[in-house]
Amino acid sequence: GAGVSQSPSNKVTEKGKDVELRCDPISGHTALYWYRQSLGQGLEFLIYFQGNSAPDKSGLPSDRFSAERTGGSVSTLTIQRTQQEDSAVYLCASSLTSGSGSDEQYFGPGTRLTVT
Amino acid sequence: DQQVKQNSPSLSVQEGRISILNCDYTNSMFDYFLWYKKYPAEGPTFLISISSIKDKNEDGRFTVFLNKSAKHLSLHIVPSQPGDSAVYFCAASAPHTGNQFYFGTGTSLTVIP
């Protein structure tokens, strides 16, 4: 079956512009995560959605970052007024149930964002 | 503050030999640990996990060992195969962290044929 998909795969943008990154989770997965991986760093948690519950936004690095998940499926991560330090690979993952520690996460291929 | 650390950025091993990837953590509340494998241009894929109630979990060629007193876990791959060449991330979670997984910075494994 189809895995997690993300688009675009690559995005180059000028500093100060806004960008939108899209994630299509695996059908039926109720939990959705966004991470980013900057060069030489580990995966950094950004935000978590579980069903219709309020998202856990505790990992968002600034108020320039926001995300939404429409209809409990597709999610969009928006970065406003991009900065060069936002350059990273942004990864989306989904899991089947509660998103607890024992639920395996399935990752998308990521979006490589470059801010020039 | 890096709560999960992988201090070896890279490792090279001959095919057929054992690969040992190490991971250290600082938060004693972590109770679930995972290893992910990542090929270039792909997202990480789940490899193996271990709960803190165990000290070993084995799945085929892959074994994860957990030493809670040392806050250390390791992934053993034996025998190593060229297809195992990838970046390996360890990750941890704790009940109080809710939905957050903390990842290490990864170790790039190269298995030499």
Image: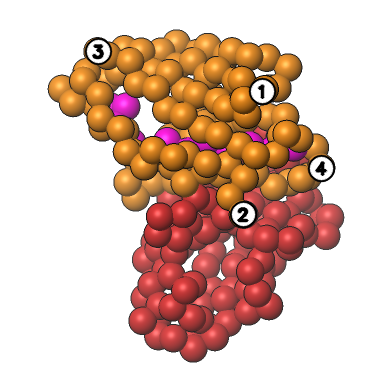
Chain colours: A red, B orange
Residue at the bottom extreme of this rendering: A16
Which SS class for mark 1?
loop
Give the distance between the C-alpha atoms of the residues marked 3 and 1, in whole angstroms: 29 Å
Cα separation, mark 3 vs mark 2, equals: 37 Å
Residues at discs 1 and 4 both on one chain: yes
Q: Are marks 4 and 3 on the same chain?
A: yes
Question: Mark 4 vs mark 3: which is more N-terminal?
Answer: 3
Residue A87 place in picture, x, y as percent: 43, 70
Determine whether the residue tagged by mark 2 lies in a helix, strand or loop. loop
Viewer-nearest of discs 1 and 4: 1
> Pointer 3 indicates a residue of which chain?
B
Name the residue rendered at 51%, 33% in the picture.
B23
If you read the primary sequence from the N terminus, does the residue marked by circle 4 or circle 2 appear first? 2
Tell me where residue A73 appears, x and y as whole percent.
Answer: 67, 55
Pointer 1: what residue? B68
Which numbered disc covers residue B16?
3
The label on residue B1 is: 2
* Circles 1 and 2 on the same chain: yes
Q: Amino acid at mark 2?
A: Asp
